[in-house]
Image (cartoon, rainbow, N blue to C red):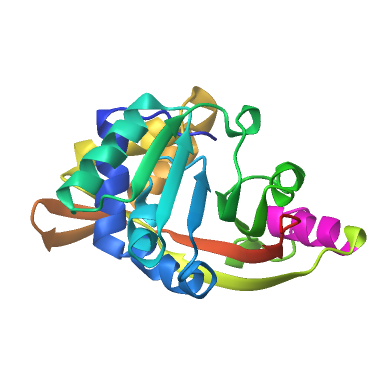
Amino acid sequence: MPISWHDDTIRWFRDSSAFTGYHRLLSYYLRPVVQGQPILTDIGCGLGLISLELAPLVEHVTCVDVSEKALASLAEDADDKGISNITTLRGDASQLDLTADVMLASYFGASQVGQWLERCRRLICVTTWAHATHEHRKGTDAERLRSRLDEAGIRYQVEHVTLEFGQPCIDRRDAARYIAEYHPGDGTAQRRANLLARLVDIDEPPFTCYLPKQRSMGVFVIEGGRR
């Protein structure tokens, strides 16, 4: 489900990243691919937190997203961190004339990856892997992407990565708002109740509770067609 960026979702996402170190840790897997590259393009960047981690390693980063609010948050964070080599670009990346040495597409479905391969030398694609308790489940993004690449004879490497990306909350009311935001609708009332029951009390001001969550991902590095 695409994130609707507003003040609360921006705050929650930033807090989760800072509290768990998720984007900093994920960047360790991507650094060998982007190190020393002239241009990195982050497609559908959202708040651009992974680009902020990678920017010191490349000459320039172009961050593309449809959300003006998300890009404004990214520009603010870059300014606060003294990062001056990031350019933001608002729009649908598929409709823009984009090329890069390395492109990054996080959580794009396997069917959307092909359009980027001719525009870059390497494509990093971060996709959903089956949850640890649902390894029997077929058709995850990682499985579909791997099948498509194998069928097309495209060279790639993939690594299975699992990182903590839970949500710290100011209080239980804040947690309830967070859960309602990401699990809307009466049909998920039981799901929301189950998530509230999983909250852990913590003493990490300003946070008083934490909702644990792990992200299981396939990190693909795919050979692009641009030379």
Between 1 and 186, the residue placed more toward the observer is: 1
Q: Residue furthest left?
A: 205
- Percent position of residue 8, x then y: 26, 33
Q: Would residue 176 be visible to someone looking at this image?
A: no
Classify the position of the N terminus by image quarter: top right
Name the quadrant containing residue 157.
bottom right
- The relative height of residue 71 versus residue 32 in the rendered view (above or below) is above
Q: Is residue 203 left or right of residue 65?
A: left
The residue under the point 24% across, 50% down is: 15
For the point 42% across and 50% down, which residue is it? 61
In the image, residue 3 lies at what x, y percent?
Answer: 45, 34
Q: Which residues make up the magenta segment?
A: 137-150
Please determine whether, in this image, residue 59 is positioned above or below residue 25. Answer: above
Tell me the chief SS of the magenta region.
helix
Asked if residue 114 shows in the view, the reply is yes
Q: Position of residue 146 (x, y in %)?
A: 78, 62
Vertical placement of residue 27 versus 71, above or below: below
Q: How many marks?
A: 0
Left or right relative to 73: residue 95: right
The answer to whether residue 145 is magenta is yes
Q: What residue is at 89 percent from the left and 58 percent from the top?
A: 152
Q: Is residue 52 one of those drawn in magenta?
A: no
Q: Is residue 185 left or right of residue 18?
A: right
Q: Is residue 130 left or right of residue 54?
A: right
Residue sitting nearer the eye, 27 or 109 = 27
Quarter placement of the C terminus:
bottom right
Could you tell me residue 221's position as x and y percent? 65, 66
Viewer-nearest residue: 49 or 101: 101
